[in-house]
Amino acid sequence: MRYEGVLKKMLTEITDEVQYYLVFEKDFINLNQLMDKKLSINFLRYQCLNCGLEKKIFRQGYCYDCWSSIPQAGEWIMRPELSKAHLEEEDRDLDFEKRSQLQPHVVYLANSSDVKVGVTRKSQIPTRWIDQGAHEAIEIVEVPNRYLAGITEVALKDHVSDKTNWRKMLTNDVLDLNLAEEREKLKDFLPEEVKPYYLANNEELEIKFPVLEFPTQVKTLNLEKSLFYEGVLKGIKGQYLIFGDGTVFNVRGHEGFVVELKVVV
């Protein structure tokens, strides 16, 4: 079997274990069905996810010109505390920013390697947790806009990490914790204007990933340095493909790369 297309982050569906899909323009693949099969990945060219031109990808699947101008790549995406749509202040496109920022957002705890705090739109749960490779997660607050979520994250990351140790996550060097207890420890550190939105009764969600074998050490596949790779697929966690020789491939980190993917065996 042969597939070709521009990489975008894998789509997911949560069932007994997470189902993963690569979606190309003319085809899609359920990657769970390729477990324990030999795959080859061949880098062909770039294709910006916004303008569609064959230009070197800068960040987030965009060429530099698009990344530096489109509202989908505004600084408030990575730093939600900079959101200003609730003040009617424009960053790059106020209409877009209102649609994105003025909707329910959740601040959460996720356990991928160690407990971390994060922010996402309510509509992105549990997708955001799956993308981070979290085997358990729980909501802390649900607020009406991105700004309130952002200032909550800023306040809480003085007391809990906001980063994922992706190597620990991929080698399954993780602990199971009672996230409801961890949430309760953070309650007093919430900003005053956010405390009314505290979620005291939500239960944690446990997530199972399709992994046959975790590597003891990981080595990353970078298609700009290695244009071709072949290996046996042993698992998928977060947005990573895990291969039998310890190689891991960050699909989301290669958005905008056009590849040929073959099932060799």
Image (cartoon, rainbow, N blue to C red):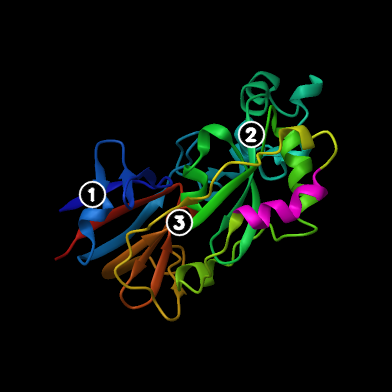
Going by the numbered disc 3, the residue's amino acid type is: Gly
To which quarter of the image does residue 77 belong? top right
Disc 3 vs disc 2: which is toward the camera?
2
Mark number displayed over residue 3:
1
Query: How far across and down, in percent of the image, does residue 201 sit?
Result: 60, 41
Residue annotated with mark 3: 238
Apparent side of residue 25 relative to residue 153 in the rendered image (left or right): left
**Is the C-beta separation of discs 3 and 2 under 8 Å?**
no
Quadrant of residue 235 within the rendered picture: bottom left
Whether residue 39 can be seen here: yes
Question: Residue 12, located in which quarter of the rendered image?
Answer: top left
Q: Where is residue 48? Give x, y as percent.
A: 48, 41
Q: Distance between the residues labelled 1 and 3?
A: 22 Å
| Residue 87 horizontal/vertical position (percent) | 81, 22
Task: State yes or no: residue 188 in magenta.
Answer: yes
The stretch of residues the image draws in magenta is 180-190
For the residue marked with disc 2, what is the amino acid? His
What residue is shown with label 2? 105
Callout 1: SS: strand
Labels 1, 3: front one:
3
Q: Earlier in the sequence, mark 1 or mark 2?
A: 1
Q: Which amino acid does label 1 sit on?
A: Tyr
From mark 1 to mark 2, how far is it between C-alphas?
A: 36 Å
Element on which disc 2 rests: strand
Quadrant where the C terminus is found in the figure: bottom left
